[in-house]
Structure formats: structure tokens, C-alpha cells
């Protein structure tokens, strides 16, 4: 078999499918892609996606989405009117024009005010447990939505400019593919002819299988799965969607010349090519000191520019009705302003913003007290947000995963759909 | 067959004769600590009716002990020397060599410097813009300390109490200051949390703002602990006549307290309860020991007192034991390993206590602690599972680790780097130690992903995902290791007077510490045909495949 090297004129794409049949290294996703191609247009119309805008460090939502002007805790920012019914911060003027698409959930009340615990909880709907690793949003949703896009050759869960949370017990195949906001993916090219690559892979696969067959645990077979995905990706035309630099100048400008702006633009390109879940990270919200100046000078302009561009762009391209946008961090910040003109960690009363995929926009759901320290209406949790997003994406809340230990685990941890988003 | 019968009978007899009925002998090399580990771990197998995996092969054991102690795989020569040794005590001999032979001092110090640096300041510490941490400064301190096997209590005391400049080559340089230089912002809350977590295994960060629901630590304790750091300041020092920062200096200065009276004789600090009530705190250690509340450095240097209290605390012993155990075994006695408070009981409490006591008794000698762990029976087991422990002892399934097999785990990025360098002699003669280290950290920086919070939260993308696979497939490091130009590793191997079979053997032994299987030899021969007899090119293909395999990247 080895001596029958592939002819050099064989295209990469052809070669890959050839190889899939020839060695033990079959690639089911790819094979399926070939047979179902005819249905692609049909599927494209129905396919749902989600974009998580992750605000690492814990953004102060009462300075952005739920202002308390005049309250001792309120800070200096003033509210402004928006295209929806809810007011937001004066430092979010572009977003104000997009609020008819978005809903502010103002009665979030959670318990995790430590960065790592909060990150985990808001990403998974579960509190950390030493005995089990829960899959994150990205892993769960891409796992559920992957069947809608048999033509997808690149990873279904892409994390831009941040780390996200891993796939837990779903396995490394659902891990986030992390890229920087420049869209540069390193080490894509092997610089070898296809025949030689194929022969190397054949030898590699033999060694891999030998080790797996010695029953040394799941890490050995997970490694092999990742090799297959890597090979798929190396040869895919869809990798072009990472190249934000190819966009027209005017578009790049609209999103803003920032890491987060490029990340949001990349997210739109990835939705277009069929990636079901994209997380774009914007860190630096952990403002224990000098919070208002930092917000108005740098953080909010960057957020406002990029988030509004993404919403507007998705709407104009007709993608927003099938794409959910979720804006959140691990928690928010204390209503009380501390001695360093900052705010500390706070999870008891805060806001998350969602929109798209058929969810009602232009509204504020729930209410906090006049000083922002309490939720005065039904409190919502990470699970409830997740359940609502699943509902919007057409994923049944009865969906159950089985952990490696055989424990059944319901999607969104039995969260309840937030009614106002759908009525 | 004999083995089977004995194991069977041991299950029946296990309640009556818990330890003596096993067929497999567990050598203890005459070391009581090893004997105690074996006994305690076996007790766990009996309790759960688990049969341990068979012993790892000599090659597997040799590979893992090199990786875990000195951070790289053994060279083929080192492997042969061990495997061919007929001495029954050869494992002890090798461990002693790796720990004490001066040929390995540099490797040993380098490996543990990397490990401790990542524990103390994270993977990205010192790479931030305007950083107050000098990574190289900390590493130099650690390397010097570890190379001459400074005892653990001394190292901890120095890290907690250090003053001086963070940068080598500047006046008053003391690299140990780099643990704290960047943790003093926001009233030293990070210094408080990290010192407690890293050295005592107490996670207190949650209690900064409120009493924690399931942690016995109360908010008061956080701030009492915090009070120890309030005389400490990080100061930027400038090159004379310029505005360029020359270095950062960690100093102790008298502290007047935060109260209205500003009375340094009772330098107090304040914190706020959730209900808005303000409370006062003075320096009190976790065990309730109070020190002189004066803020004058002439009266008391609070960090010096803290250093003594930490070194006297049994939490120090347990945390060190748990960290070392987890490093070698893949899992600790608690999860996470640095959360050892009363709310998180350990899986083998007697063993943790005993090893902690012995560690203290034996002068906090890290090398002795390492010896006990690596010569123990659980460390000698194969990573191949059997029907009795495949699921019952799989921590990935949420089971508490019972150490009835060696848990496979991925090499760290640093281990991969050093292993490739060793296997291919790639860095020989390429610049000074510092230059080589700089190249390594540049390469490593590609894997760091920061979380964007003030606590320096981060993860590594060297975690078995696609970017890592791409790096192994096509990255510079592997390209370098597999190049076939004149004088390269593969070129030299091809031109050596070994037979073709021996050359293939060499590659497999260098990477896996084993000979190739029959099928693997066949595939190598096919590659030689495909390369039309170009031996170096065929070796290149095989070497590439070997380095990209699970068996190479996984410590097994």
C-alpha cells in the first residue's frame, strides 16, 4: 500500500477523501459531507448559531445596562434612550441604536463571586465539582447543532481572543479551537507533497492504534480524534473565514480597530461559513480601582463599537434571526464604590444581555432595587439563560448527556426558559 | 496462572490478612516511608476490591522517572544503561543518580525551577506590560536554591520574607522577591490569597469579601492574614538621571494603619462586611497566633513573623507532600491539590499526615520526599488497565484516585521541548544557558491564554487540542528535530554504522523507550521503499510519525 504513492496532481480535497478510505484513519464527518452536499442549501436555511461575547473579569452591569442615576451607588454615568424600550449607559451610544434587537435580563442573581468559579458556572450552568468536569456552552451547543452543517470542515467551537471553558466529559473533540483576534492560525502548512503526508499519517496511525489497544485510558484515543480534526482543518478552504483582513476597510472600521472588534467580525464570518458556536473574549473588566474613567475612556467605547457592529451586520445580512448573541461575564461588580474608586466582585444582582435567534428584543426583563443591591423580581440564573438560548436555537431542554461515569445530565441543568424572551 | 490463584485468594483473605497475601512483592528498598506508602495504598485497593495493574516495564519506568524528575525523556544510552543493569536495586540507584549525580544537577534544577516558577507566578508572570516581576530573576534564585538542594522550609521562608531588588545584576539583588512584587496592589489581597494557597493549601480568596458558605475560613481571617503584608511595598527604581525603570525593589516600611488615629503602635486595617458594617483586623495567623500589632518595622517585621509561622504550620508539610505526590502520580490526595482546608478531606488522610511528618523530620529535604514517592509501588505500576481497575479507578470518570495504575498524562510543554532537545541534541553549542532559556520561553509563550482578570488567571493551549497538534505536525520545533541536513541528528543517525533495523530501533527507543513492534518495522521498511531508498528521508518520516504519536506526548 505504501508503495502506491498518490499522484502529485491529486488535489488536497480529493486526497483527503482517498486517504479516508485507504487507511484506518477514516474521517466520518468528511465522508458524510460528500454524500449530503445536495442538501446543503436546504440545511443552511435552517441552521442556528450562537455567539457568546465573554467579558472576562466581571463587567459592572450597573454602569452599562442597568443604571441608577442619583443613587449613592450609581456612579457618574447617565442613562440614554435606545431604539428599544430600555435605557442604557450614555457611553454605549451605538449600541443604543441596536437595542431593539436585544433584551437586558436585569434580575440575574448568582452565587459565585470568585473568578474561576464564576467563569465555570456561567459557562456551564453548574457549580464546580471536583469529581466531574461539565461541558461548556460552546461544547454543548456545537455538539447539538453540528448535524445541521455536514459540510463543516473546521472546528464547530471557536474561541477568539480568550480561553473559554473546555468540553468536560464530552471529550476533547468538542474543545474550543482558540485563535487570536488577528485570525492567524499558526503552523497550518506542512510544506510536503500529499503522498508523503499520507504515508506519514499511515505510519502515525499504526503507532496510535497500537498504543490505544493497550487500554491505557481515554487520553490515548482522544489524541487520535484530535489528529483527525487537525488534518481536516489543514486541508480546508473554510479556513479563509478566519482572515478578517480580507474584509473591506469600511467594514473593519465599523467594527473598530481593536482586538475585540476584529474578533466580532471574525465571529460573523465564522457564522457565515457554518460554525455553530463562537466565543469572543474581551477581558480587563476586573476594575477594583478607578472604574468609571477606565470604562468611559477605553472599555465601553471598544465594546460599544464592536457589539453594535456585530448586531447590525448580522441583522442586515439576515443572519440575526438564526443567531443568538449572549453578552455576559462571570459576575458583576459591587454597587458600592470602594475607597479606590473601583467596584469589587458582586454576583447577587446583575445583568446579562441576549438577542437574536427569535428572542424578543427591545426589552428589559426583571428589576433591581434603587441602589442596585437587590433583585426585586424573579431572580434568573446561568441555567435559565442557557435554557432560554437552547430554546431559541431549537434545542430540546429534555436533551440529556451522559457523563463518563454514567451519570445523566440534563442540558442547561434544568434551567427554566425566561418567558418574556419568547411571549 | 499461579499469579491468578494468589490474587484470587488475596481477595478472599483480604479482610483477614490485608497485606501479606499478595503475590506481587512490593519492594521498599529498606526505606520505611516507601513501605508505609505501599501499605496505605494497598489498603485502599483492598477496601475497594481493586486489583492493581501489572508493573510497568523497565523502559516505561525509566522514561517516566526521567520525565518526572529531570523533565525530559532518557537518551538511548541512558535507557540502555538502566535496562541492562541486573542489579535488583537498580531503581534506587537511578533515582539517586538523577537526584544527586552532578551530571544531572543542571537538568534537575532546570526542571524544578520551571515547575516552581509556574506555581509561584504562573506561566505568564513577568511577561505583562510594565511587569513588576522579573521572571529570570525568580528563576535564577530558584535554580541556585534547587541546585544546592536548599531545604524547602528555607525556600518558603525566603520567598515570604524577601526584600531587595528583583533583577539580577542590580544592587541588592534577591530573586526571591519576585514571588510577591506583583501581588501587592489592592492592599496586597493577591499576596494574601496566593501565599495561603501555594504554601498552606488554603483557598481564601473567596473570603476576602464575605464568609464562605462551605469554607471554614471567615472573612476576618482573610484580613488578619492580609495584615502581615501591609508593611510591604514594591518600588520602581530608575536608572540614575533617566526615567527608565532599572529594577523593582521590595521593601518593608513602617505602616501607620488605616484608622483615623494613624497610630503605628497598633497599626490596624479595616474591611467591610456585606451588610456594610466595618470591622478592624490585626495580624493573626490561621491557627490563631497573634503577633505584636505595631506597624513600626523597628518593633516587628510582620512578614518575618509570617515566614516563621508558615514554616511551623503542619499545613506547610501537607501541601508540599500533596504537590509532590500529584506531580509524580498525576493526581493528588485532594482535588484541587492546593485546597486542603477542612471542608475538602483527602483521599488518604493517614498517608498525608505521615508523609508530612516525615518530611518535616527529615529537614524538609525535597529529594528525600521525591525518593519515597518514586520508589513506591504505585509509581512502579503500568498505565495499562485491567478489568478490575479500568473504570473503578479512573479519575476521569469522577472516581477518587486509588493509584492502582499509572495515570497517563500529557507532557508539559517544557518537557516536550527539553525531550526533543535531548533526543536530537538540537541545542548543543547554541549559545549560553540564558540564550537557550530565552529561546525556550519564546517558544512557550505561544501557548499562554490569559483570562483577563486581575488575579492573573490563565490556561495553556498546550492541552491536547488542535493548535497543539498543528504545532507538532508543522511547527518549527518538530521541523528542527526532524530536519535531515548535513550534521543534523537524522543525518548522523543515517550515516552511522548501525544496521537499518538498529537505526529504526534507535528512533523508537529515543522516543518511547521501547523497541518497535513487528508491524512498525514493516511500515518503516515500506517508507524506505516509498522514499526510493533515501534512508535519511525514510528516517525523517518515521521520526515525524513517532514524535506526533500519543505514545510520545503522553507520559505513561
Image (spheres, rainbow, N blue to C red):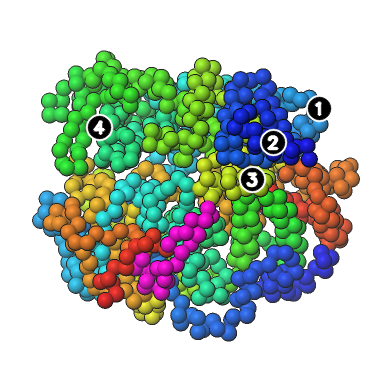
Q: Position of residue A360 (x, y in %)?
A: 28, 74
CA gap between label 3 and label 4 equals 48 Å
Labels 1 and 4 in the same subunit: yes
Specify the label residue B388 is tagged with.
3
The numbered mark, 3 or 4, whose residue comes first in the sequence reads: 4
Quarter of the image holding residue A351?
A: bottom left
Specify the label residue B43 is tagged with.
none
Specify the label residue B9 is tagged with.
2
Question: Which segment did they paint magenta?
Answer: A387-410
CA gap between label 1 and label 4 equals 60 Å
The numbered mark, 1 or 2, whose residue comes first in the sequence reads: 2
CA gap between label 2 and label 3 equals 15 Å
Check if residue A395 falls in the magenta segment: yes
| Label 3 SS | loop
Instruction: Return the residue at label 1.
Output: B86
Quarter of the image holding residue B310?
A: top left
Q: Residue at x 33, y 59 (%)?
A: A382
**Dot 3: within a 10 Å radius of its alpha carbon, few (fewer than 14), some, or many (20 or more) residues?**
some
**Dot 2: within a 10 Å radius of its alpha carbon, few (fewer than 14), some, or many (20 or more) residues?**
some
Labels 2 and 4 in the same subunit: yes
Check if residue B208 falls in the magenta segment: no
Q: Position of residue A257 (x, y in %)?
A: 38, 63
Check the residue under mark 1 and report the chain it is in. B
Amino acid at each position: 500500500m505504501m508503495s502506491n504513492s498518490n499522484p502529485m496532481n491529486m488535489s488536497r480535497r480529493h486526497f483527503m477523501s482517498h486517504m479516508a478510505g485507504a487507511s484506518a484513519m477514516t474521517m466520518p464527518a468528511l465522508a458524510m459531507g460528500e454524500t449530503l452536499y445536495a442538501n446543503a442549501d436546504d440545511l443552511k436555511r435552517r441552521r442556528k448559531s450562537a455567539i457568546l461575547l465573554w467579558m472576562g473579569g466581571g463587567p459592572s452591569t450597573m454602569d452599562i445596562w442597568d443604571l441608577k442615576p442619583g443613587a449613592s451607588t450609581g456612579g457618574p454615568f447617565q442613562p440614554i434612550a435606545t431604539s428599544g424600550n430600555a435605557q442604557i449607559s450614555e457611553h454605549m451610544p451605538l449600541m443604543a441604536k441596536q437595542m431593539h434587537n436585544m433584551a437586558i435580563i436585569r434580575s440575574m442573581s448568582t452565587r459565585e463571586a470568585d473568578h474561576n468559579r464564576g467563569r465555570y458556572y456561567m459557562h456551564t450552568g453548574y457549580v464546580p465539582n471536583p469529581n466531574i468536569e461539565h461541558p461548556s456552552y460552546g461544547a454543548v451547543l456545537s455538539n447539538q447543532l453540528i448535524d445541521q452543517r455536514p459540510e463543516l470542515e473546521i472546528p464547530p467551537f471557536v474561541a477568539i481572543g480568550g480561553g473559554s471553558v473546555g468540553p468536560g466529559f464530552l471529550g476533547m473533540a468538542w474543545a474550543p479551537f482558540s485563535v487570536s483576534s488577528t485570525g492567524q492560525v499558526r503552523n497550518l502548512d506542512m510544506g510536503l507533497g500529499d503522498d508523503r503526508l499520507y504515508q506519514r499519517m499511515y505510519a502515525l496511525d499504526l503507532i496510535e492504534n497500537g498504543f490505544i489497544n493497550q487500554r491505557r485510558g481515554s487520553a490515548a484515543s482522544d489524541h487520535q480524534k484530535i489528529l483527525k480534526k487537525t488534518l481536516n482543518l489543514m486541508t480546508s478552504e473554510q479556513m479563509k473565514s478566519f482572515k478578517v483582513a480580507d474584509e473591506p476597510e469600511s467594514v473593519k472600521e465599523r467594527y473598530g480597530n481593536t482586538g475585540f472588534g476584529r474578533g466580532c467580525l471574525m465571529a460573523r464570518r465564522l457564522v457565515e461559513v457554518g460554525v455553530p458556536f463562537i466565543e469572543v473574549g474581551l477581558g480587563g473588566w476586573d476594575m477594583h480601582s478607578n472604574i468609571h474613567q477606565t470604562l468611559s475612556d477605553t472599555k465601553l467605547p471598544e465594546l460599544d463599537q464592536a457589539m453594535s457592529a456585530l448586531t447590525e451586520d448580522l441583522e442586515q445580512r439576515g443572519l440575526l434571526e438564526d443567531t443568538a448573541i449572549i453578552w455576559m461575564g462571570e459576575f458583576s461588580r459591587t454597587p458600592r464604590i470602594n475607597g479606590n474608586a473601583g467596584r469589587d466582585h458582586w454576583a447577587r444582582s446583575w445583568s446579562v444581555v441576549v438577542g437574536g435567534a427569535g428572542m424578543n428584543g427591545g426589552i428589559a426583563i426583571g428589576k433591581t432595587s434603587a441602589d442596585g443591591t437587590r433583585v426585586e423580581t424573579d431572580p434568573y440564573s446561568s441555567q435559565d439563560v442557557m435554557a432560554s438560548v437552547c430554546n431559541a436555537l431549537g434545542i430540546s431542554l429534555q436533551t440529556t448527556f451522559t457523563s463518563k461515569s454514567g451519570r445523566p445530565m440534563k442540558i442547561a441543568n434544568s434551567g427554566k426558559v425566561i418567558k418574556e424572551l419568547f411571549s | 496462572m499461579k499469579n491468578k490463584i494468589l490474587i484470587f485468594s488475596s481477595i478472599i483473605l483480604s479482610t483477614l490478612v490485608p497485606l501479606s497475601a499478595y503475590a506481587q512483592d512490593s519492594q521498599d528498598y529498606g526505606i520505611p516511608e516507601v513501605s508505609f506508602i505501599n501499605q496505605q495504598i494497598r489498603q485502599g485497593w483492598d477496601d475497594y476490591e481493586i486489583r492493581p495493574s501489572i508493573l510497568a516495564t523497565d523502559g516505561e519506568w525509566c522514561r517516566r522517572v526521567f520525565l518526572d524528575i529531570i523533565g525530559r525523556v532518557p537518551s538511548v544510552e541512558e535507557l540502555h544503561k538502566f535496562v541492562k543493569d541486573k542489579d535488583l536495586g537498580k531503581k534506587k540507584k537511578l533515582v539517586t543518580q538523577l537526584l544527586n549525580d552532578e551530571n544531572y544537577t543542571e537538568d534537575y534544577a532546570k526542571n524544578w525551577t520551571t515547575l516552581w516558577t509556574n506555581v509561584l507566578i504562573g506561566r505568564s508572570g513577568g511577561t505583562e506590560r510594565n511587569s513588576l516581576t522579573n521572571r529570570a530573576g525568580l528563576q535564577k534564585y530558584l535554580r541556585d536554591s534547587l541546585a544546592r538542594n536548599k531545604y524547602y522550609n528555607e525556600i518558603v521562608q525566603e520567598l515570604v520574607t524577601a526584600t531587595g531588588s528583583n533583577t539580577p545584576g542590580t544592587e541588592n539583588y534577591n530573586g526571591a522577591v519576585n514571588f510577591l512584587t506583583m501581588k501587592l496592589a489592592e492592599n496586597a489581597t493577591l499576596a494574601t490569597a496566593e501565599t495561603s494557597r501555594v504554601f498552606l493549601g488554603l483557598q481564601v480568596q473567596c473570603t476576602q469579601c464575605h464568609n464562605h458558605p462551605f469554607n471554614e475560613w471567615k472573612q476576618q481571617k482573610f484580613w488578619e492574614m492580609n495584615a502581615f503584608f501591609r508593611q510591604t511595598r514594591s518600588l520602581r527604581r530608575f536608572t540614575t538621571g533617566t526615567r527608565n525603570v532599572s529594577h523593582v525593589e521590595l521593601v518593608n516600611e513602617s505602616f501607620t494603619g488605616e484608622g483615623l488615629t494613624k497610630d503605628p503602635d497598633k497599626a490596624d486595617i479595616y474591611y467591610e462586611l456585606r451588610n456594610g458594617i466595618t470591622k478592624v483586623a490585626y495580624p493573626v495567623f490561621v491557627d490563631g497566633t497573634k503577633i505584636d500589632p505595631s506597624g513600626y518595622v523597628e518593633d516587628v517585621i510582620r512578614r518575618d513573623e509570617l515566614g516563621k509561622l508558615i514554616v511551623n504550620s503542619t499545613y506547610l508539610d501537607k501541601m508540599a507532600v500533596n504537590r509532590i505526590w500529584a506531580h509524580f502520580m498525576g493526581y493528588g490526595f485532594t482535588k484541587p491539590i492546593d485546597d486542603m482546608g477542612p471542608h475538602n478531606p483527602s483521599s488518604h488522610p493517614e498517608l498525608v499526615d505521615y508523609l508530612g511528618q516525615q518530611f518535616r523530620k527529615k529537614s524538609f529535604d525535597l529529594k528525600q520526599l521525591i525518593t519515597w514517592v518514586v520508589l513506591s509501588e504505585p509509581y512502579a505500576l503500568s498505565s495499562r488497565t485491567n478489568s478490575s481497575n479500568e473504570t473503578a479507578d479512573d479519575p476521569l470518570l469522577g472516581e477518587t484516585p486509588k493509584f492502582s495504575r499509572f495515570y497517563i498524562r500529557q507532557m508539559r510543554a517544557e518537557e516536550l521541548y527539553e525531550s526533543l532537545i535531548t533526543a536530537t541534541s538540537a541545542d548543543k553549542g547554541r549559545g549560553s544557558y540564558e540564550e537557550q532559556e530565552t529561546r525556550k520561553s519564546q517558544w512557550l509563550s505561544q501557548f499562554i491564554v490569559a483570562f483577563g482578570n486581575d488575579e492573573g488567571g490563565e490556561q495553556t493551549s498546550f492541552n491536547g487540542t488542535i493548535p497543539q497538534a498543528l504545532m507538532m505536525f508543522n511547527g518549527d520545533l518538530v521541523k528542527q528535530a526532524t530536519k535531515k541536513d548535513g550534521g543534523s541528528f537524522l543525518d548522523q543517525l543515517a550515516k552511522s554504522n548501525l544496521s537499518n533495523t538498529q537505526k529504526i530501533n534507535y528512533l523508537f527507543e529515543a522516543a518511547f523507550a521501547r523497541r518497535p513492534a513487528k508491524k512498525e518495522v514493516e511500515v518503516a521498511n515500506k517508507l524506505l521503499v516509498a522514499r526510493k531508498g533515501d534512508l535519511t528521508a525514510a528516517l525523517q518520516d518515521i521520526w515525524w510519525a513517532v514524535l506526533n504519536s500519543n505514545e510520545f506526548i503522553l507520559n505513561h
